[in-house]
Image (spheres, rainbow, N blue to C red):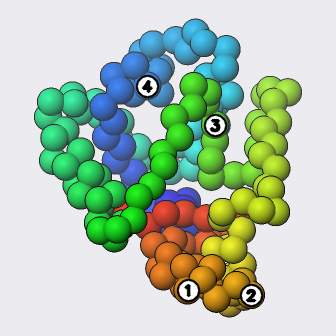
Amino acid sequence: MAINMGITALEIFGDSKLIINQLLIEYEVKKDDLIPYFRLATQLLQEFETVTLEHVPRKENQMADALANLASSMTLGEDEAADVPVCQRWVIPLVTEILLDDTNVISVLPVDVEEWRQPLIDYLEHGKLPDDPKHHSEIRRRAPRFLYYKETLYRRSFE
């Protein structure tokens, strides 16, 4: 999104010293499953005139953590609950297909027609609502929390 917005200078703050130092080429990426992500990140960073990468220790990152927690707590109503699945694998959630120049890696994430995101996408992109009145009101209530941009559904946050 920053590239599409024409941003030329980027400051990146991260709490993972390993990732920051790998992107600064101070550390080597040793895990094979992380190499495609490293290459993609490196390609994207080359699109900017200046990039600053800075490690912020977690103990000094309490304000950002508090804001992130506040944002997640404010997006649900009092009577609502959310299930947060925890996966033990790496995914690139912002794109449905990625082809990296120097590798033979293609990541394809098929979209299930019955997936929870599809009604939101249909509403945000085409104004189409489900026939079920209960689902109809739920989609209208949840839609302002999301942004559909260049075929990708983003959840709005303070960041």
Observer-side mark, 4 or 1, equals: 1
In space, the residues marked 2 and 3 are separated at their CA atoms by 33 Å
Amino acid on which disc 1 is placed: Ser
Please report whichever mark, 2 or 3, sits nearer to the chain's N-terminal start.
3
Q: Mark 1: few, some, or many residues within 10 Å (few <14, many ≥20)?
A: few
Q: Position of residue 105 (x, y in %)?
A: 81, 30
Observer-side mark, 1 or 3, equals: 1
Asked if marks 4 and 1 touch (Cβ < 8 Å), the reply is no
- Residue at numbered disc 2: 131
- Residue at numbered disc 4: 19
Amino acid on which disc 2 is placed: Asp
In space, the residues marked 4 and 1 are separated at their CA atoms by 42 Å
Q: Decide which of 87, 108 is in the foreground and name it.
A: 87
Q: Quadrant of residue 41?
A: top right
Q: Decide which of 18, 9 is in the foreground and name it.
A: 18
Observer-side mark, 2 or 3, equals: 2
In space, the residues marked 1 and 2 are separated at their CA atoms by 10 Å
Amino acid on which disc 4 is placed: Ile
Left or right position of 111 against 74? right
Q: Quadrant of residue 131?
A: bottom right
Left or right position of 132 against 25? right
- Residue at numbered disc 1: 137
- Residue at numbered disc 3: 91
The answer to whether residue 6 is visible is no
Please report whichever mark, 1 or 2, sits nearer to the chain's N-terminal start.
2
Q: Position of residue 69 (x, y in %)?
A: 26, 51
Please report whichever mark, 4 or 1, sits nearer to the chain's N-terminal start.
4
Left or right position of 56 against 26? left
The answer to whether residue 56 is visible is yes
